[in-house]
Amino acid sequence: MTAVIEVRDLTKRYKDTLALDAVSFDVEKDTIYGFLGRNGAGKTTAMSILTAQNFATSGSVRVFGEHPYENARVLSRICFVRESQKYPDDATARHALAAARLFFPHWDQDLAERLVDEFQLPMRTRIKKLSRGQLSAVGVIIGLASRAEITFFDEPYLGLDAVARQIFYDRLLADYAEHPRTILLSSHLIDEVANLVERVLVIDRGRIIMDETTEDALQKATNLVGDAAAIDAFLRGREVIHRESLGRVSSVTFVGGLTAAERGEASAAGLELAPVSLQQLIVRSTQHATHAPASEKEEVAS
Amino acid sequence: MIEEGKPLFVQIAERIEDSIVDGSLPERDQAPSTNELAAFYRINPATAAKGVAMLVDKSVLEKRRGIGMFVSDGARELLLRERRDAFADRYITPLIDEARRIGLSPTDLAALVREHGSTPQASPDTGRQS
Amino acid sequence: MSAVASSPQRHNRILNVVRLQFINKVTYIWMPLLVLGASWVISILIFAMIPLDGPKYGGGAQAPLWAFMAVGIQAMTMSFPFSQAMSLTRREFYLGTLAAASVTGVMLSTVFVVIGLIEKATDGFGVNGYFAYLPAVWASGWWAAWITYFVITMFLFVIGFWSATIFKRWGTLAVTLVLTGLGLILVGVVFLITRLEAWPATWTWLVETGPLGLALWAVPAIALMALGSYVTLRRAVA
């Protein structure tokens, strides 16, 4: 598969924080990526640097094989929808969409108009007077109708209610199916986007902690519920990333899966197996990383 | 609607298989397209495509170039055979385990099955009363 | 800046930035015209009320220029972030915006000259009041007046734009320091002239140079600030 974005050892240092710490990853063509992580983990910083809106402290970024900085050849093929975008004073949604039409070579006016209807966006109201949800809708519509070869959505739906969010996901999928392109969707609403994204890139405190297909990620951890002692005995030697207890019953999330034989054993021991949702997996992995350095393995006491 | 556990594409494939087995998607009919599946289940088209590919590999679906995916001849028989083979592992063994847990022997179990199975119910492929 | 080896598509994009600035016609067209027009009307009314017989001159023509300086500032604070959302390079935004400002400059200067010609023809609208036809400005002819007004318009726009790029790149403290620094230099020059008792000579020079001459002196200043803006903008984050 071709990589349309190649990031090598990307570092971004602010005065006293390391926003990105020697991050490396590739983004493959025509794939929807979930760019996931907590607030402040480095997602927006990374996307800003990839679109040359912000600058790296060190490391290299290649988009379509070139450096994006001041590179109209590259930039005209990408679109970055930010969480809170500034618009010219007194601009209306109509102005914003008319502007987008000028600069995105694959802009689809029909799609834009359909989306305006669906999101019920008032076109002639000043953007600064729009509600948070309507403001987000402007960005989302620009991002979708731009049909840019690489589109970045940075938590673009803050302020959108659940219905509007579903409209966004549905339109995104439908348009992607008709016009495949590379999409990076950052979100902290992980379970909402889990089925949409083909690959997940998880970033935690400036480091990539996961870079794989959603499928593979979901197989990464398993959850066992049952008698605490029985679980501990069963899980000897495995890396535990989360544990909850209620009386004698524990719910333990551990790295890896179980073979068919092991599943039988667990069932015989009265333990219930449950899959871990993507959100739980990522939340628990990042919590785990917070409480223990990455190199430590929590051995289950035998 | 989508449960967790098995990979998503496997779940999609199984749903298509279900509709073939219960007759709502007959043999020789056109299967839903990748994009239709993606839109309906609200999933990534690549995932839907993977599920379809899996069924093509199993010879449950076949590709007719230029037209689309169709349910293969004999797909239903194939699936029924597959499910009967897996039936014991999927249903019988856990049933026996659970029964044993609550103090029922396989003989008790057999009696229960006969008792509850005597409710009149047409079986889909033979029309016989069980 | 790179040599003009841009593809036609690239030229198109800069032109589109000009169009971008004019999508909302208020900022670069209606507002400046409105301010000029309103200032003009107000000036005439005031002239009409003053009971003097001789010609009266007012400074109302400068009103739109200060408003346009605000446009220069907003070009950086509001337009620039949006240009980033449109995936424009900083260079495209810069050139397109300056071009758009020039269009407004041309428009305003032309209107100014037209008003001046009307004033000349009607003897100050019958009230002997002159808003645009200021003798010193028109001394070398209507074209001199046009150039003077145009240069001053661009001068104020670029000051606004330049200050705003400093603000965007380095923040409030930096702008304050720069403007204070300039102010100090100005005060320093005044101090120097006073110390050298050179005021008469200075006035003579100013009068001899005239508004057109002074405007032409402003051109290198505009060029310097424009260049400075570009260099600062290159590393500014929206």
Image (cartoon, coloured by chain):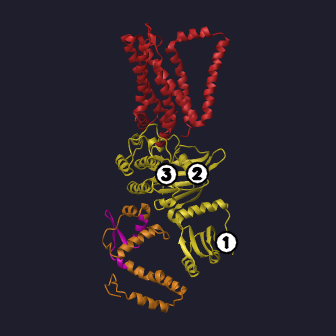
Chain colours: A yellow, B orange, C red
Give yes or no for contact between labels 2 and 1 (Cβ–Cβ under 8 Å). no
Badge 3 element: loop
Q: Secondary structure at mark 2?
A: loop
Q: Which residues are magenta?
A: B48-77
Whole-angstrom CA distance, mark 3 to mark 2, is: 18 Å
The reply, left or right, for residue C203 in relation to residue C140 is right
Q: Marks 3 and 1, Cα distance to the nearest angstrom?
A: 40 Å
Name which of mark 2 and mark 1 comes first in the sequence.
2
> Which chain letter matches label 1?
A
Q: Residues within 10 Å of mark 2 (few under 14, many from 20)?
A: many
Mark 1 secondary-structure assignment = loop
Give the percent coordinates (x, y) of residue A281. 56, 64
The residue carrying mark 1 is A300
Query: Three-letter amino acid code at disc 1?
Result: Val
Is the residue at mark 2 from the same chain as the one at mark 1?
A: yes
Q: Which residue is mark 2?
A: A42
Magenta stretch: residue C91 in it? no
Q: Which residue is mark 3?
A: A158
Farthest top residue in view: C53
